[in-house]
Image (cartoon, rainbow, N blue to C red):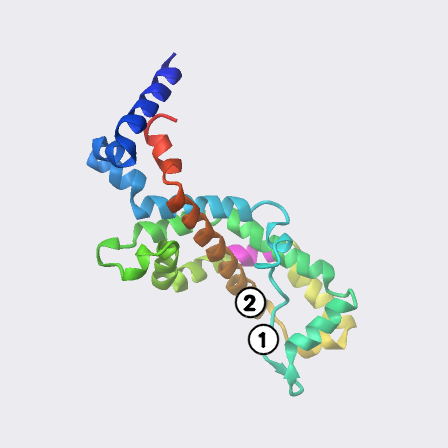
Amino acid sequence: MKTRSLELNRRLLLGSFGMAGAIALMPSAARAQGLGLSSILGQATDSALDKLSRPGAFYGDEDIRIALPIVGDVGGGLLGSVLNAGSRLGVLGDVTRSINDAAGIAAGEAKPIFRDAIDDLSFSDAPGIIGESDGGTQYLRQSSNDRLHSRLEPLIDGALEKLGVYTAFDGLAENHSFIRRAGLDRQSINRSVTDQGLDGIFAYIGAEEQGFRKNPLKGLGSLLGN
């Protein structure tokens, strides 16, 4: 009965006054919390990280799939061409999947990190980009990228260790000269995976923010008892 009553009140509210009227009738604190950019950005971040923490999410999306680390030049040619040759030979296929899986594990643990960064943002003096469809995401990255990177690195490092990526590279280096020539170490692998993982996370946050802006009733529903 209570659920039906809340739903009826919600429909009457929206039907009689429209979106603007419904917002006007809310307490100011609820408006700020439920419909403010900070709230939208928080919801977008949670939703993005939930999606990316699903098994295979990073590897399955070619737009954000994490490539093998590139740390410099080898013999006058790009290191990427050396590693890509190894990938084509099938030597690094499992490692590539493990790298992407590590990013997914870290994404599942990263909500508090992103929430802290969002809570520290000051939107009162934010630049004009926050009016854009993914402006909150842009502002978050502009303001907090280095901080988020430094806090995400330990999560990535732990996941890479857990999935045996470092051990795999050590073993491959003993048997394949192109791996030894790459000169990869734990630090460079972690940094590269964190860089690419953060790119993917922000891409997803931006898409989620755009979705919440187009359909603000997603956030409004929780305030009206849905």
| Residue situated furthest bottom in the rendering | 76
| Residue situated furthest top in the rendering | 1
Identify whether 138 is placed above or below 216: below
Examine the structure image and report whether residue 156 is included in the region drawn in magenta: yes
- Left or right of 16, for residue 100: right
Task: From the image, give the main secondary structure of the stretch colored magenta.
Answer: helix
- Three-letter code for the amino acid on which mark 2 is drawn: Ser
Identify whether 221 is placed above or below 163: above
- Left or right of 89, for residue 215: left
- Left or right of 154, for residue 126: left
Asked if the residues shown at circle 2 and circle 1 are in contact, with their CB atoms under 8 angstroms apart, the answer is: yes
Q: Position of residue 26 (x, y in %)?
A: 23, 32
Asked which secondary structure carries label 2, the reply is helix
Identify whether 118 is placed above or below 172: above
At 60% from the left edge and 61% from the top edge, which residue is drawn? 66
Q: Which residues are magenta?
A: 155-160
| Labels 2 and 1: the sequence-earlier one | 1
- Three-letter code for the amino acid on which mark 1 is drawn: Val
Location of the C terminus (image quadrant): top left
Give the residue number, with chain letter if any, for mark 1.
71
Please rate how many residues cluster around mark 1, counting C-alpha atoms within 10 Å: few if below 14, some from 14 to 19, many from 20.
some
Q: CA distance from mark 2 to mark 1?
A: 8 Å
Give the residue number, with chain letter if any, for mark 2.
192
User: Is residue 162 something that shows in the picture?
Assistant: no
Q: Position of residue 128 (x, y in %)?
A: 28, 61
Asked which secondary structure carries label 1, the reply is loop
Q: In front here: 154 or 111?
A: 111
Q: Position of residue 202 (x, y in %)?
A: 46, 57
Examine the structure image and report whether residue 212 is included in the region drawn in magenta: no
At 39% from the left edge and 60% from the top edge, which residue is drawn? 141
Would you identify the image quadrant in which residue 196 lies?
bottom right
